[in-house]
Image (cartoon, grey):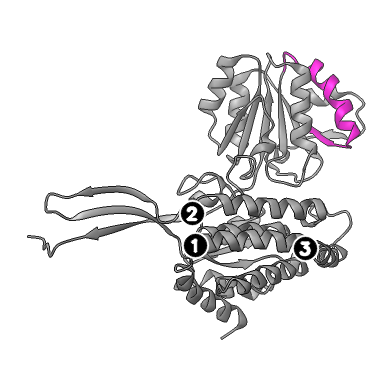
Amino acid sequence: MTITEKLIHKTHEASFSLQKVSDSRIKKTLAELAAEIEKNIPQLIKANKKDLARQDKDNPKNDRLMLNEERIRAIAKSIRQVSKLPNPSGKILEKKVLYNGLQLQKISAPLGVIGAIYESRPNVTFDIASLCFRSMNACVLKGSRDAEDSNKAAIGIIKKVLKQNRIDPDCINLLPSDREAVQHLFTAEKYIDVIIPRGSNELIQYVRKNSLVPVIETGAGVCHTYVEKDADVDKAVAIVVNAKITRPSVCNSLDSLLIDEAIAKKFLQRLMPEFKKFNVEVFADGKSFNLIGNYPLKQKASPGDFSREFLSLKCAVKIVKNYNEAIEHIRKYSTKHSEAIVSKNKMVCERFLDEVDAAAVYSNASTRFTDGGEFGLGAEIGISTQKLHARGPFALEKLVTEKWVIRGKEQIRE
Protein backbone atom coordinates (compact mmCIF):
# COMPACT_ATOMS: atom_id res chain seq x y z
CA MET A 1 0.00 0.00 0.00
CA THR A 2 1.40 3.41 -0.99
CA ILE A 3 1.70 6.40 1.34
CA THR A 4 -1.23 8.03 -0.46
CA GLU A 5 -3.46 4.99 -0.04
CA LYS A 6 -2.60 4.79 3.67
CA LEU A 7 -3.45 8.46 4.15
CA ILE A 8 -6.78 8.05 2.34
CA HIS A 9 -7.68 5.01 4.46
CA LYS A 10 -6.72 6.81 7.69
CA THR A 11 -8.88 9.78 6.72
CA HIS A 12 -11.81 7.48 6.03
CA GLU A 13 -11.46 5.88 9.46
CA ALA A 14 -11.07 9.24 11.18
CA SER A 15 -14.29 10.49 9.57
CA PHE A 16 -16.31 8.24 11.90
CA SER A 17 -14.75 9.62 15.09
CA LEU A 18 -15.24 13.15 13.78
CA GLN A 19 -19.01 12.61 13.89
CA LYS A 20 -18.76 12.23 17.68
CA VAL A 21 -16.98 15.54 18.27
CA SER A 22 -19.23 18.15 19.88
CA ASP A 23 -20.09 21.34 18.06
CA SER A 24 -18.59 23.42 20.85
CA ARG A 25 -15.24 21.60 20.59
CA ILE A 26 -15.17 22.08 16.82
CA LYS A 27 -15.75 25.82 17.25
CA LYS A 28 -13.10 26.03 19.98
CA THR A 29 -10.59 24.14 17.81
CA LEU A 30 -11.13 26.50 14.87
CA ALA A 31 -10.68 29.55 17.10
CA GLU A 32 -7.41 28.09 18.40
CA LEU A 33 -6.32 27.29 14.84
CA ALA A 34 -6.78 30.94 13.86
CA ALA A 35 -4.63 32.02 16.80
CA GLU A 36 -1.96 29.42 16.01
CA ILE A 37 -1.78 30.61 12.40
CA GLU A 38 -1.09 34.15 13.58
CA LYS A 39 1.62 32.87 15.95
CA ASN A 40 3.29 31.11 13.03
CA ILE A 41 3.30 33.96 10.49
CA PRO A 42 7.13 33.99 10.19
CA GLN A 43 7.28 30.22 9.67
CA LEU A 44 4.55 30.31 7.02
CA ILE A 45 6.26 33.14 5.15
CA LYS A 46 9.59 31.32 5.32
CA ALA A 47 8.07 28.16 3.83
CA ASN A 48 6.25 30.20 1.19
CA LYS A 49 9.48 31.90 0.11
CA LYS A 50 10.94 28.48 -0.65
CA ASP A 51 8.03 27.84 -3.02
CA LEU A 52 8.35 31.25 -4.66
CA ALA A 53 12.09 30.77 -5.14
CA ARG A 54 11.39 27.78 -7.42
CA GLN A 55 9.15 29.81 -9.74
CA ASP A 56 9.86 31.96 -12.75
CA LYS A 57 9.72 35.55 -11.44
CA ASP A 58 7.43 36.57 -14.33
CA ASN A 59 4.90 33.78 -13.76
CA PRO A 60 1.46 35.42 -13.24
CA LYS A 61 0.54 32.58 -10.86
CA ASN A 62 3.05 33.91 -8.33
CA ASP A 63 0.44 36.30 -6.97
CA ARG A 64 -1.80 33.34 -6.15
CA LEU A 65 1.09 31.50 -4.55
CA MET A 66 2.43 34.34 -2.44
CA LEU A 67 1.73 34.62 1.29
CA ASN A 68 2.48 37.73 3.32
CA GLU A 69 1.47 38.89 6.79
CA GLU A 70 -1.67 40.63 5.53
CA ARG A 71 -2.88 37.54 3.68
CA ILE A 72 -2.10 35.21 6.57
CA ARG A 73 -4.01 37.41 9.00
CA ALA A 74 -6.90 37.39 6.50
CA ILE A 75 -6.80 33.57 6.57
CA ALA A 76 -7.01 33.59 10.36
CA LYS A 77 -9.88 36.08 10.25
CA SER A 78 -11.74 33.89 7.77
CA ILE A 79 -11.33 30.83 10.01
CA ARG A 80 -12.72 32.79 12.96
CA GLN A 81 -15.73 33.68 10.81
CA VAL A 82 -16.21 30.03 9.87
CA SER A 83 -16.06 29.01 13.54
CA LYS A 84 -18.98 31.33 14.31
CA LEU A 85 -21.20 30.04 11.49
CA PRO A 86 -23.86 27.47 12.38
CA ASN A 87 -23.06 23.83 11.68
CA PRO A 88 -24.97 22.92 8.49
CA SER A 89 -25.15 19.25 9.54
CA GLY A 90 -27.93 17.84 11.67
CA LYS A 91 -30.63 20.31 10.68
CA ILE A 92 -34.18 19.03 10.37
CA LEU A 93 -35.21 19.96 6.83
CA GLU A 94 -38.62 18.29 6.81
CA LYS A 95 -40.76 16.15 9.10
CA LYS A 96 -44.12 14.46 8.87
CA VAL A 97 -46.14 11.48 10.07
CA LEU A 98 -47.41 9.02 7.46
CA TYR A 99 -50.90 7.47 7.43
CA ASN A 100 -49.47 4.34 9.07
CA GLY A 101 -47.85 6.20 11.94
CA LEU A 102 -44.27 6.19 10.62
CA GLN A 103 -42.46 9.34 11.73
CA LEU A 104 -40.26 10.77 8.98
CA GLN A 105 -37.52 13.36 9.21
CA LYS A 106 -35.22 14.61 6.49
CA ILE A 107 -32.02 15.92 8.02
CA SER A 108 -28.82 17.43 6.67
CA ALA A 109 -25.77 15.19 7.04
CA PRO A 110 -22.05 15.52 6.28
CA LEU A 111 -20.90 14.35 2.86
CA GLY A 112 -18.33 12.16 4.64
CA VAL A 113 -14.83 12.35 3.18
CA ILE A 114 -14.09 15.16 0.75
CA GLY A 115 -11.14 15.03 -1.60
CA ALA A 116 -9.88 18.41 -2.81
CA ILE A 117 -7.37 18.96 -5.60
CA TYR A 118 -6.12 22.48 -6.21
CA GLU A 119 -3.34 24.57 -7.69
CA SER A 120 -0.83 27.08 -6.32
CA ARG A 121 -2.84 28.91 -3.67
CA PRO A 122 -1.73 27.76 -0.17
CA ASN A 123 -4.58 29.65 1.51
CA VAL A 124 -6.90 27.02 0.01
CA THR A 125 -5.37 24.41 2.34
CA PHE A 126 -6.67 26.37 5.33
CA ASP A 127 -9.95 27.30 3.64
CA ILE A 128 -10.97 23.77 2.72
CA ALA A 129 -9.70 22.22 5.95
CA SER A 130 -11.67 24.68 8.11
CA LEU A 131 -14.88 24.40 6.08
CA CYS A 132 -14.80 20.60 6.04
CA PHE A 133 -14.01 20.42 9.75
CA ARG A 134 -16.80 22.88 10.66
CA SER A 135 -19.33 20.80 8.70
CA MET A 136 -18.02 17.54 10.27
CA ASN A 137 -16.50 16.27 7.02
CA ALA A 138 -13.06 14.66 6.91
CA CYS A 139 -10.87 15.72 3.99
CA VAL A 140 -7.85 14.69 1.95
CA LEU A 141 -6.07 17.60 0.32
CA LYS A 142 -4.01 17.42 -2.86
CA GLY A 143 -2.14 20.65 -3.45
CA SER A 144 0.24 21.38 -6.28
CA ARG A 145 4.00 21.00 -6.26
CA ASP A 146 4.27 24.78 -6.64
CA ALA A 147 3.02 25.26 -3.07
CA GLU A 148 4.51 22.14 -1.49
CA ASP A 149 6.45 23.80 1.33
CA SER A 150 3.63 26.20 2.14
CA ASN A 151 1.08 23.39 2.27
CA LYS A 152 3.28 21.24 4.49
CA ALA A 153 3.70 24.12 6.91
CA ALA A 154 -0.07 24.68 6.91
CA ILE A 155 -0.97 21.06 7.56
CA GLY A 156 1.58 20.92 10.37
CA ILE A 157 -0.19 23.78 12.15
CA ILE A 158 -3.61 22.20 11.57
CA LYS A 159 -2.59 18.81 12.93
CA LYS A 160 -0.93 20.37 15.97
CA VAL A 161 -4.16 22.12 16.94
CA LEU A 162 -6.27 19.00 16.32
CA LYS A 163 -4.02 16.97 18.63
CA GLN A 164 -4.17 19.66 21.31
CA ASN A 165 -7.97 19.33 21.26
CA ARG A 166 -7.91 15.51 21.37
CA ILE A 167 -9.33 15.17 17.85
CA ASP A 168 -7.98 12.53 15.48
CA PRO A 169 -5.50 14.49 13.31
CA ASP A 170 -6.12 12.09 10.42
CA CYS A 171 -9.49 13.73 9.79
CA ILE A 172 -7.47 16.23 7.72
CA ASN A 173 -4.62 14.87 5.61
CA LEU A 174 -2.36 16.34 2.94
CA LEU A 175 -1.42 13.95 0.13
CA PRO A 176 2.02 13.94 -1.53
CA SER A 177 2.35 16.46 -4.36
CA ASP A 178 3.35 13.85 -6.99
CA ARG A 179 1.10 12.77 -9.87
CA GLU A 180 0.77 9.22 -8.58
CA ALA A 181 -1.22 10.59 -5.65
CA VAL A 182 -3.80 12.00 -8.07
CA GLN A 183 -4.53 8.59 -9.56
CA HIS A 184 -5.04 7.05 -6.12
CA LEU A 185 -7.40 9.90 -5.28
CA PHE A 186 -9.42 9.30 -8.46
CA THR A 187 -9.87 5.57 -7.75
CA ALA A 188 -10.66 5.74 -4.01
CA GLU A 189 -14.42 5.58 -4.51
CA LYS A 190 -14.81 3.29 -1.46
CA TYR A 191 -13.14 5.81 0.83
CA ILE A 192 -13.86 9.26 -0.63
CA ASP A 193 -17.39 10.50 -1.19
CA VAL A 194 -16.76 13.47 -3.48
CA ILE A 195 -13.84 15.26 -5.15
CA ILE A 196 -13.81 19.02 -5.58
CA PRO A 197 -11.23 20.45 -8.01
CA ARG A 198 -10.21 24.10 -7.73
CA GLY A 199 -7.96 25.75 -10.27
CA SER A 200 -7.59 26.14 -14.01
CA ASN A 201 -10.11 24.91 -16.54
CA GLU A 202 -7.54 22.31 -17.63
CA LEU A 203 -7.36 20.89 -14.11
CA ILE A 204 -11.12 20.84 -13.70
CA GLN A 205 -11.72 19.08 -17.02
CA TYR A 206 -8.96 16.57 -16.25
CA VAL A 207 -10.59 15.66 -12.93
CA ARG A 208 -14.04 15.38 -14.54
CA LYS A 209 -12.80 13.02 -17.23
CA ASN A 210 -10.64 10.78 -15.04
CA SER A 211 -12.20 10.47 -11.60
CA LEU A 212 -14.27 7.46 -10.56
CA VAL A 213 -15.27 9.43 -7.47
CA PRO A 214 -18.20 11.86 -8.01
CA VAL A 215 -17.02 15.40 -8.81
CA ILE A 216 -18.44 18.77 -7.84
CA GLU A 217 -16.88 21.37 -10.12
CA THR A 218 -15.62 24.80 -9.23
CA GLY A 219 -15.34 26.61 -12.53
CA ALA A 220 -12.84 28.80 -14.25
CA GLY A 221 -13.95 32.37 -14.86
CA VAL A 222 -14.21 34.22 -18.15
CA CYS A 223 -15.91 37.25 -16.64
CA HIS A 224 -17.54 40.03 -18.67
CA THR A 225 -18.51 43.58 -17.88
CA TYR A 226 -20.90 45.26 -20.32
CA VAL A 227 -20.88 49.07 -20.30
CA GLU A 228 -24.32 49.90 -21.67
CA LYS A 229 -25.11 53.14 -23.53
CA ASP A 230 -26.85 54.69 -20.50
CA ALA A 231 -23.93 54.10 -18.13
CA ASP A 232 -22.39 56.82 -16.03
CA VAL A 233 -18.97 56.86 -17.73
CA ASP A 234 -16.90 57.84 -14.70
CA LYS A 235 -18.54 55.24 -12.47
CA ALA A 236 -18.23 52.62 -15.21
CA VAL A 237 -14.50 53.31 -15.51
CA ALA A 238 -14.08 52.86 -11.76
CA ILE A 239 -15.94 49.54 -11.82
CA VAL A 240 -13.99 48.21 -14.81
CA VAL A 241 -10.61 49.23 -13.37
CA ASN A 242 -11.45 47.63 -10.04
CA ALA A 243 -12.58 44.40 -11.73
CA LYS A 244 -9.37 44.19 -13.73
CA ILE A 245 -6.50 45.40 -11.58
CA THR A 246 -7.22 44.65 -7.90
CA ARG A 247 -6.36 40.94 -8.10
CA PRO A 248 -5.93 40.01 -11.78
CA SER A 249 -4.80 36.47 -10.93
CA VAL A 250 -8.14 35.38 -9.43
CA CYS A 251 -11.15 33.87 -11.14
CA ASN A 252 -13.57 36.77 -10.49
CA SER A 253 -11.41 39.38 -12.22
CA LEU A 254 -12.48 40.96 -15.52
CA ASP A 255 -11.47 39.17 -18.72
CA SER A 256 -13.67 40.70 -21.44
CA LEU A 257 -14.99 44.24 -21.62
CA LEU A 258 -18.00 44.94 -23.83
CA ILE A 259 -18.82 48.56 -24.68
CA ASP A 260 -21.94 49.94 -26.33
CA GLU A 261 -20.88 51.76 -29.50
CA ALA A 262 -23.00 54.79 -28.55
CA ILE A 263 -20.55 55.70 -25.76
CA ALA A 264 -17.47 53.74 -26.84
CA LYS A 265 -15.29 56.71 -27.84
CA LYS A 266 -15.98 58.71 -24.69
CA PHE A 267 -15.60 55.70 -22.44
CA LEU A 268 -12.31 54.50 -23.94
CA GLN A 269 -10.86 58.02 -23.72
CA ARG A 270 -11.47 57.92 -19.96
CA LEU A 271 -10.50 54.27 -19.45
CA MET A 272 -7.19 53.94 -21.28
CA PRO A 273 -5.22 56.40 -19.12
CA GLU A 274 -6.34 54.38 -16.08
CA PHE A 275 -5.34 51.09 -17.73
CA LYS A 276 -1.98 52.61 -18.65
CA LYS A 277 -1.22 53.34 -14.99
CA PHE A 278 -1.25 49.59 -14.36
CA ASN A 279 0.17 48.46 -17.71
CA VAL A 280 -2.95 46.55 -18.70
CA GLU A 281 -2.44 44.82 -22.03
CA VAL A 282 -5.48 45.14 -24.30
CA PHE A 283 -6.66 42.69 -26.97
CA ALA A 284 -9.01 44.83 -29.02
CA ASP A 285 -11.51 44.04 -31.75
CA GLY A 286 -11.33 46.10 -34.96
CA LYS A 287 -13.58 48.98 -33.83
CA SER A 288 -12.04 49.41 -30.40
CA PHE A 289 -8.51 49.04 -31.78
CA ASN A 290 -9.03 52.16 -33.89
CA LEU A 291 -10.71 54.16 -31.11
CA ILE A 292 -8.00 53.34 -28.57
CA GLY A 293 -5.49 55.19 -30.71
CA ASN A 294 -1.82 55.11 -29.78
CA TYR A 295 -2.18 53.12 -26.54
CA PRO A 296 1.19 51.31 -26.30
CA LEU A 297 -0.08 47.99 -24.91
CA LYS A 298 -2.71 47.13 -27.49
CA GLN A 299 -2.94 44.44 -30.12
CA LYS A 300 -5.68 43.13 -32.36
CA ALA A 301 -7.76 40.42 -30.77
CA SER A 302 -8.18 36.97 -32.26
CA PRO A 303 -11.48 35.11 -31.72
CA GLY A 304 -9.76 32.95 -29.10
CA ASP A 305 -8.94 35.98 -26.95
CA PHE A 306 -12.60 36.35 -26.04
CA SER A 307 -12.70 32.90 -24.45
CA ARG A 308 -9.49 33.35 -22.42
CA GLU A 309 -9.28 33.51 -18.66
CA PHE A 310 -6.25 35.79 -18.54
CA LEU A 311 -5.39 35.66 -14.80
CA SER A 312 -3.06 38.60 -15.40
CA LEU A 313 -3.12 42.28 -16.40
CA LYS A 314 -4.65 41.53 -19.79
CA CYS A 315 -8.13 42.27 -21.08
CA ALA A 316 -10.13 41.63 -24.23
CA VAL A 317 -12.21 44.59 -25.49
CA LYS A 318 -15.13 44.53 -27.93
CA ILE A 319 -17.58 47.19 -29.09
CA VAL A 320 -21.15 45.96 -29.51
CA LYS A 321 -24.04 47.58 -31.34
CA ASN A 322 -26.57 47.22 -28.54
CA TYR A 323 -27.79 45.21 -25.56
CA ASN A 324 -28.83 42.22 -27.68
CA GLU A 325 -25.39 41.87 -29.24
CA ALA A 326 -23.79 42.07 -25.80
CA ILE A 327 -26.04 39.30 -24.49
CA GLU A 328 -25.31 37.16 -27.55
CA HIS A 329 -21.57 37.58 -27.01
CA ILE A 330 -21.79 36.68 -23.33
CA ARG A 331 -23.85 33.57 -24.08
CA LYS A 332 -21.24 32.46 -26.59
CA TYR A 333 -18.13 32.97 -24.46
CA SER A 334 -19.24 32.93 -20.82
CA THR A 335 -18.12 30.18 -18.45
CA LYS A 336 -21.13 31.14 -16.29
CA HIS A 337 -19.03 32.45 -13.44
CA SER A 338 -19.62 36.21 -12.94
CA GLU A 339 -21.15 38.70 -15.39
CA ALA A 340 -21.89 42.41 -14.96
CA ILE A 341 -23.72 45.30 -16.59
CA VAL A 342 -23.13 49.00 -15.88
CA SER A 343 -26.10 51.23 -16.71
CA LYS A 344 -28.39 53.88 -15.21
CA ASN A 345 -31.33 52.23 -16.99
CA LYS A 346 -32.95 50.08 -14.28
CA MET A 347 -35.15 48.17 -16.74
CA VAL A 348 -32.12 47.16 -18.83
CA CYS A 349 -30.25 46.12 -15.69
CA GLU A 350 -33.14 43.94 -14.55
CA ARG A 351 -33.32 42.33 -18.01
CA PHE A 352 -29.63 41.53 -17.77
CA LEU A 353 -30.01 40.00 -14.30
CA ASP A 354 -32.91 37.86 -15.52
CA GLU A 355 -31.51 36.79 -18.87
CA VAL A 356 -27.82 36.10 -18.19
CA ASP A 357 -27.10 32.54 -17.07
CA ALA A 358 -24.24 32.68 -14.56
CA ALA A 359 -23.51 31.80 -10.97
CA ALA A 360 -23.34 35.52 -10.10
CA VAL A 361 -24.84 38.38 -12.11
CA TYR A 362 -24.27 42.04 -11.23
CA SER A 363 -25.69 45.41 -12.09
CA ASN A 364 -23.48 48.43 -11.40
CA ALA A 365 -20.84 46.58 -9.37
CA SER A 366 -17.49 44.90 -9.83
CA THR A 367 -17.35 41.13 -10.42
CA ARG A 368 -14.60 41.02 -7.80
CA PHE A 369 -17.27 40.55 -5.13
CA THR A 370 -17.93 36.93 -6.12
CA ASP A 371 -16.34 35.44 -3.04
CA GLY A 372 -17.55 33.44 -0.05
CA GLY A 373 -16.15 35.91 2.45
CA GLU A 374 -17.68 38.92 0.67
CA PHE A 375 -21.06 37.16 0.52
CA GLY A 376 -20.97 36.54 4.28
CA LEU A 377 -20.43 32.80 3.87
CA GLY A 378 -17.01 32.64 5.51
CA ALA A 379 -14.32 30.93 3.48
CA GLU A 380 -15.11 29.02 0.30
CA ILE A 381 -13.89 25.92 -1.48
CA GLY A 382 -14.32 27.64 -4.83
CA ILE A 383 -16.89 29.20 -7.14
CA SER A 384 -19.17 26.55 -8.58
CA THR A 385 -20.38 27.23 -12.12
CA GLN A 386 -22.37 24.01 -12.47
CA LYS A 387 -26.04 23.66 -11.56
CA LEU A 388 -26.15 20.48 -9.49
CA HIS A 389 -25.88 20.66 -5.69
CA ALA A 390 -24.15 24.05 -5.44
CA ARG A 391 -23.73 27.18 -7.55
CA GLY A 392 -21.73 30.30 -6.84
CA PRO A 393 -19.46 30.50 -3.77
CA PHE A 394 -19.20 26.88 -2.64
CA ALA A 395 -19.10 27.41 1.10
CA LEU A 396 -20.06 25.79 4.39
CA GLU A 397 -23.81 25.58 3.77
CA LYS A 398 -23.32 23.29 0.75
CA LEU A 399 -20.95 20.76 2.34
CA VAL A 400 -23.84 18.51 3.34
CA THR A 401 -26.19 15.99 1.84
CA GLU A 402 -29.59 14.74 3.01
CA LYS A 403 -30.60 11.73 5.04
CA TRP A 404 -34.04 10.30 5.81
CA VAL A 405 -34.64 9.13 9.38
CA ILE A 406 -37.70 6.95 9.96
CA ARG A 407 -39.03 6.00 13.40
CA GLY A 408 -41.59 3.24 13.57
CA LYS A 409 -43.61 1.10 15.94
CA GLU A 410 -43.30 -2.32 14.33
CA GLN A 411 -45.04 -1.23 11.10
CA ILE A 412 -44.79 -3.55 8.10
CA ARG A 413 -45.77 -2.76 4.55
CA GLU A 414 -48.86 -4.59 3.34
Q: Quadrant of residue 256?
A: top right
Q: What residue does disc 1 label?
A: 136
Question: What separation in Å lies between label 2 and label 3 (alpha carbons)?
Answer: 27 Å
Element assignment for label 2: loop
Give the left or right position of residue 164, taking residue 295 as reference: left
- Going by the numbered disc 1, the residue's amino acid type is Met
Quarter containing the N terminus:
bottom right
Q: Earlier in the sequence, mark 2 or mark 3?
A: 3
Q: Which residues are magenta?
A: 261-284
Question: What separation in Å lies between label 1 and label 3 (alpha carbons)?
Answer: 26 Å
Q: What residue does disc 3 label?
A: 39
Query: Which residue is found at the position 22% from the left and 60% from the top?
Result: 407
Along the line of sight, which residue is nearer the eye, 102 or 142?
A: 102
Judge whether residue 266 is colored magenta: yes
Q: Is residue 315 above or below residue 9?
A: above
Q: What residue does disc 2 label?
A: 87
- Going by the numbered disc 3, the residue's amino acid type is Lys
Query: Which residue is found at the position 61% from the left and 74% from the top?
Result: 163
Q: Is residue 78 above or below residue 258?
A: below
Query: Which residue is found at the position 78% from the left and 57% from the top?
Result: 65
